[in-house]
Image (spheres, rainbow, N blue to C red):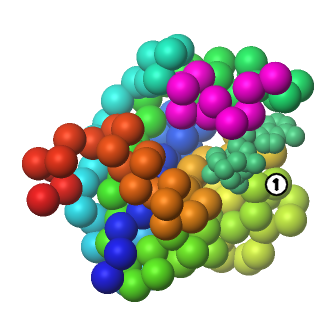
């Protein structure tokens, strides 16, 4: 079993889709290991998405991610990061497969309902960024 990090983004929380997304996660065989609702501070969002600094969408991304509450997730499953990316669907909902979270709940490439770590290494880094060790024990 492995762990990955996810976020139910502010658009999905604001639209009242958080519960449906949590239900989909469980229905797809993930175990919820940690869940926390928070509102990201600007420096948290900037640090988290530092890899995108300088890109044309960076400022809008930080503004969106700090626009309202989101839900931080630690998910457990075999091959967790890849399985969670698969359930989320493509970054742009226009390209997302049927039944994926982004197909069902995202409105645009910017407001795309969910985040998922893109490697096992980044999952460990992102989990450590947002959760205390005792929350994942
Ligand atoms: P995430 O990291 O949020 O899980 P991702 O890995 O599918 O998404 P990235 O390339 O890491 O995609 O982009 C991070 C986020 O930046 C995207 O989820 C999206 O919200 C935003 N983003 C990426 N590309 C664009 C774009 N061209 N225009 C607007 N927003 C974008
Ligand atoms: Mg990414």
Q: Is residue 6 left or right of residue 34?
A: right
Which residue: 48% across, 40% down? 13
Numbered marks: total? 1
Q: Is residue 113 visible?
A: yes
Find numbered disc 1 in the image and state the secondary structure of the residue it sits on. Answer: loop
- Looking at the image, is 47 positioned above or below residue 87? above
Looking at the image, residue 109 sits to the left or right of residue 3; the answer is right
> What is the magenta range?
45-54
130 or 61: nearer the viewer:
130
Whole-percent x, y for residue 31 in the image: 29, 73
Residue 40, percent across and down? 44, 24
Above or below — where is 56 with respect to 2? above
Q: Residues within 10 Å of mark 1 (few under 14, many from 20)?
A: some
Residue at x-position 34% and y-position 30%: 38
Q: Nearer the viewer, residue 132 or 39?
A: 132
Q: Quadrant of the C terminus?
A: bottom left
Quarter of image, ligand 1: top right
Asked whether mark 1 and ligand 1 are closer than 8 Å, the reply comes as yes
Residue positioned 49% across, 60% down in the render: 121
Farthest top residue?
42
Residue drawn at point x = 35 percent, y = 75 percent: 2
In the foreground, 79 or 10: 79
Q: Is residue 47 magenta?
A: yes
Q: Quadrant of residue 22?
A: bottom left
Residue 105 x, y percent position in the rendering:
64, 55
Q: Quadrant of residue 86?
A: bottom right
Instruction: Give yes or no for residue 9 being in the magenta stretch.
Output: no
Look at mark 1 in the image and give the residue it sits on. 92
Does residue 87 show up?
no
- Please tell me whether the stretch drawn in magenta is mainly helix, strand or loop: helix
Apparent side of residue 40 relative to residue 45 in the rendered image (left or right): left
């Amino acid at each position: 079993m492995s762990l990955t990090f996810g976020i139910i983004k502010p658009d999905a929380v604001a639209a009242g889709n958080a519960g449906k997304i949590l239900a989909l996660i469980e229905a797809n065989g993930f175990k919820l290991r940690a869940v926390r609702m928070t509102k990201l501070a600007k420096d948290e969002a900037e640090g988290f998405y530092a890899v995108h600094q300088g890109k044309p969408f960076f400022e809008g991304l930080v503004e969106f991610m700090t626009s309202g509450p989101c839900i931080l997730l630690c998910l457990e499953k075999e091959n967790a990061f890849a399985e969670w990316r698969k359930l989320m669907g493509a970054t742009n909902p226009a390209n997302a497969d049927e039944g994926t979270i982004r197909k069902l709940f995202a409105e645009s490439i910017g407001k795309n309902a969910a985040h998922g770590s893109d490697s096992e290494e980044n999952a460990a880094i992102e989990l450590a960024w947002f959760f205390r060790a005792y929350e994942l024990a």
